[in-house]
């Protein structure tokens, strides 16, 4: 009987120890779960989503009737430096430094925007019989290629400014000769110190730059004789 009682006491103590260990594990799990919830909640309060912007130029007027328009032209997509193609809005705190707004991005590729704007203005000029995006087909006489050189906020010349620079050229597809070329750089002042104000000024400056780039249009090319008439 004595040995039985001793065995029973050992089992009882062992069972009590297991219960204490189980309770400790449960408490540890609860504490860790609560800590994880606190961390997730604090992180959730800091989540930031990007703001997206686009340029919005006024639509060009309807093209006038132009009986002498014979030339056909295609517009290649404009190129740009790699840093302008990343999608973020660019600022320059110094001539040698380029910065990016992490939470302020373009909703449309600026190169695509400039290309579409140039196509619209070529069409509205009334100087061309046909204007289209370049698709590699040799069914046009002239090709326009261009480059968006700058589209950025400038912070190092006293106050906040924006700068837009564009260049373009027109090439005779048959001969490879450059028949027209132009380049412009426009600067605008930003009156408020926030990104929406910067984008608004970029919009106004871009409008001036494109208008200046395409004024005047290459009139002699546009109103010249057709390929059939030249032959």
Image (cartoon, rainbow, N blue to C red):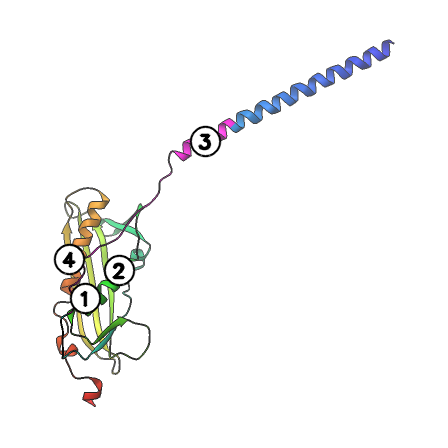
Q: Please give the label number shown on residue 6.
A: none
CA gap between label 2 and label 3 equals 42 Å
Which-is-in-front pick, marks 1 and 3?
1
Q: Earlier in the sequence, mark 1 or mark 3?
A: 3
Q: Residue at x 69, y 21 (%)?
A: 18
CA gap between label 3 and label 4 equals 48 Å
**With respect to residue 12, does 69 lie above or below?**
below
Q: Earlier in the sequence, mark 4 or mark 2?
A: 2
Magenta-highlighted residues: 34-63
Residues at marks 1 and 3 touching, judged by CB atoms closer than 8 Å: no
Which-is-in-front pick, marks 1 and 2?
1
In the rendered image, residue 79, in percent from the top left (x then y), is placed at 28, 64
Q: Nearer the viewer, residue 54 or 88?
A: 54
**Mark 1 highlights which residue?**
121
**Mark 4 highlights which residue?**
186
The answer to whether residue 154 is visible is: no
Which-is-in-front pick, marks 4 and 2?
2
CA gap between label 1 and label 3 equals 54 Å
* The C terminus sits in image quarter: bottom left
In the rendered image, residue 81, in percent from the top left (x then y), is placed at 29, 60
CA gap between label 1 and label 2 equals 12 Å
* The N terminus sits in image quarter: top right
**Mark 2 highlights which residue?**
113
Q: Earlier in the sequence, mark 2 or mark 3?
A: 3
Which-is-in-front pick, marks 4 and 1?
1
Mark 1 falls on what kind of element?
A: helix
Residue lying farthest top?
2
Q: Residue at x 24, y 52 (%)?
A: 96
Q: Earlier in the sequence, mark 4 or mark 1?
A: 1
């Amino acid at each position: 009987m004595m040995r039985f009682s001793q065995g029973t006491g050992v089992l009882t103590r062992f069972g009590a120890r297991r219960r204490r260990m189980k309770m400790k594990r449960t408490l540890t799990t609860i504490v860790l779960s609560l800590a994880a919830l606190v961390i997730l909640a604090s992180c959730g309060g800091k989540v930031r989503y990007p703001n997206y912007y686009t340029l919005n130029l006024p639509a060009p007027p309807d093209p006038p009737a132009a009986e002498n328009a014979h030339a056909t032209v295609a517009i290649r997509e404009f190129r740009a430096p790699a840093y302008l193609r990343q999608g973020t809005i660019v600022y320059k705190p110094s001539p040698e430094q380029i910065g990016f707004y992490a939470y302020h991005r373009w909703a449309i590729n600026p190169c695509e925007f400039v290309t579409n704007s140039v196509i619209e203005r070529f069409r509205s000029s009334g100087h061309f019989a046909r204007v289209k995006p370049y698709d590699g087909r040799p069914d046009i006489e002239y090709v326009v290629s261009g480059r968006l050189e700058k589209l950025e906020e400038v912070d190092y010349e006293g106050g906040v400014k924006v700068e837009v620079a564009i260049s373009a050229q027109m090439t005779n597809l048959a001969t490879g000769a450059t028949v027209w070329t132009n380049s412009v750089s426009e600067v605008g002042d930003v009156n408020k110190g926030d990104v929406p104000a910067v984008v608004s000024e970029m919009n106004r400056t871009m409008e001036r730059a494109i208008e200046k780039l395409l004024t005047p249009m290459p009139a002699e090319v546009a109103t010249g004789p057709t390929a059939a008439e030249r032959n």
